[in-house]
Image (cartoon, rainbow, N blue to C red):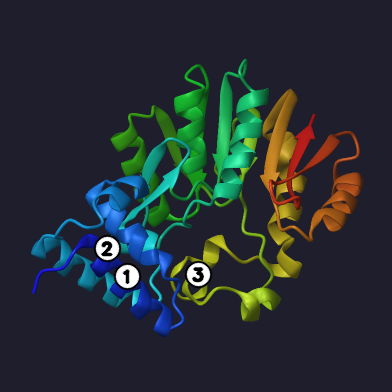
């Protein structure tokens, strides 16, 4: 028996809710596969949903019920003005990281070179390369699988970037006008309060760090002056509770740098700029 888009979506949302799964995942997978906006879905809510589309929705629901993030189900996630291919080899780009990229964009219009350290899907570095075409962007990651995803995104989006496999700065001898990094910063102690789908499917290599989530910041602060030019800057995202610890680390490890912390749109301290 045929049904409308609205009926199919409401049934999907009820099913997900009954299993304590976020019901909005149904809208995400349906609109993304159709390349529709949510407004278009509302306009077509009473139209009969084609059987092939309904069948695909049911297959997607089976994955959502297994706590697979909807972005991995469809293999796409939005960031700024583009859609990025994502797999469980990379973190799903978050809206909060767009705020970090906006900060870099506002500061670095005259820069000539930049490094996206720990690039994952390439969302940060590719966005900067597209928005700042005069900047030569290098994207690095320790994960070969992650670099394969960022390489595909660079090709699909037409971004001219250099990709380098490197564990932090190990295989990056160059200096840059700016470095931006969304490093792993979650403490293993926080696992018990994290979203089940994040824990089950997103790469732990890109999520967690030792020493209460601070280990890679220590590594970064210890090496950054060898990789940024005089007058350059570094931009970092961090956990909302980590500002006091990071401020202490910067004062000890980088006493000549100027540190500026910023809050995100939720009013939480989430971003750091180091000016050298």
Which dot, 3 or 2, sits closer to the camera?
2
Q: Which residue is mark 1?
A: 10
Residue 19 horizontal/vertical position (percent): 41, 84
Local SS, label 1: helix
212 left or right of 141 in image: right
Rendered position, 191 above or below 230: below
| Residue found 39% across the figure and 65% down from its top | 25
Q: Which residue is mark 2?
A: 6
Per the rendering, the mark at residue 33 is none
Query: Pointer 3: residues within 10 angstroms few (<14), some, or many (20+)?
Result: some
- Quick one: SS at disc 2? helix
**In the foreground, 98 or 206:** 98
Residue at figure coordinates x 73%, y 53% from the top left:
217
The residue identified by callout 3 is 198
Residue 213 vertical placement versus 226 (above, below) = below
Quick check: marks 1 and 2 in contact, CB under 8 Å? yes
Task: Specify the quadrant of the image occupied by residue 187.
Answer: bottom right
At horizontal 36% and vertical 77% (from top left) the residue drawn is 14
Give the quarter of the figure containing the C terminus: top right
- Residue 193 in picture, x, y percent from top left: 64, 77
Q: Nearer the viewer, mark 3 or mark 1?
A: 1
* Residue situated in front as seen by the camera: 161 or 72: 72
Residue 64 position within the rendered picture, expressed as x and y whole percent measured from the top left: 35, 73
């Amino acid at each position: 028996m045929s049904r409308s888009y609205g009926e199919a979506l409401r049934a999907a949302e009820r099913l997900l809710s009954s299993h304590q799964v976020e019901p909005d995942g149904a809208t995400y997978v349906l609109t993304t596969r159709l390349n529709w906006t949510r407004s278009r879905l509302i306009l077509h809510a009473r139209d009969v949903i084609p059987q092939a589309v309904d069948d695909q929705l049911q297959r997607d629901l089976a994955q959502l019920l297994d706590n697979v993030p909807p972005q991995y189900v469809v293999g796409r996630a939005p960031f700024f003005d583009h859609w990025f291919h994502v797999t469980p080899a990379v973190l799903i780009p978050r809206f909060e990281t767009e705020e970090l990229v906006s900060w870099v964009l506002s500061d670095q219009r005259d820069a000539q070179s930049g490094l996206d350290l720990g690039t994952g899907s390439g969302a940060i570095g590719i966005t900067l390369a597209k928005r700042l075409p005069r900047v030569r962007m290098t994207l690095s990651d320790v994960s070969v699988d992650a670099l394969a995803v960022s390489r595909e995104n660079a090709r699909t989006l037409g971004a001219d970037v250099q990709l380098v496999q490197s564990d932090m700065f190990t295989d990056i001898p160059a200096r840059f006008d700016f470095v931006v990094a969304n490093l792993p910063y979650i403490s293993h102690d926080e696992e018990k309060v994290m979203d089940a789908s994040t824990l089950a499917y997103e790469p732990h290599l890109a999520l967690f760090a030792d020493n209460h989530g601070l280990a890679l910041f220590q590594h970064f602060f210890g090496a950054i002056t060898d990789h940024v030019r005089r007058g350059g800057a570094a931009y970092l995202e961090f956990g909302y509770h980590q500002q006091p610890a990071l401020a202490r680390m910067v004062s000890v490890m980088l006493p000549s740098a100027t540190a500026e912390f910023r809050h995100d749109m939720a009013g939480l301290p989430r971003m750091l700029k180091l000016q050298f």
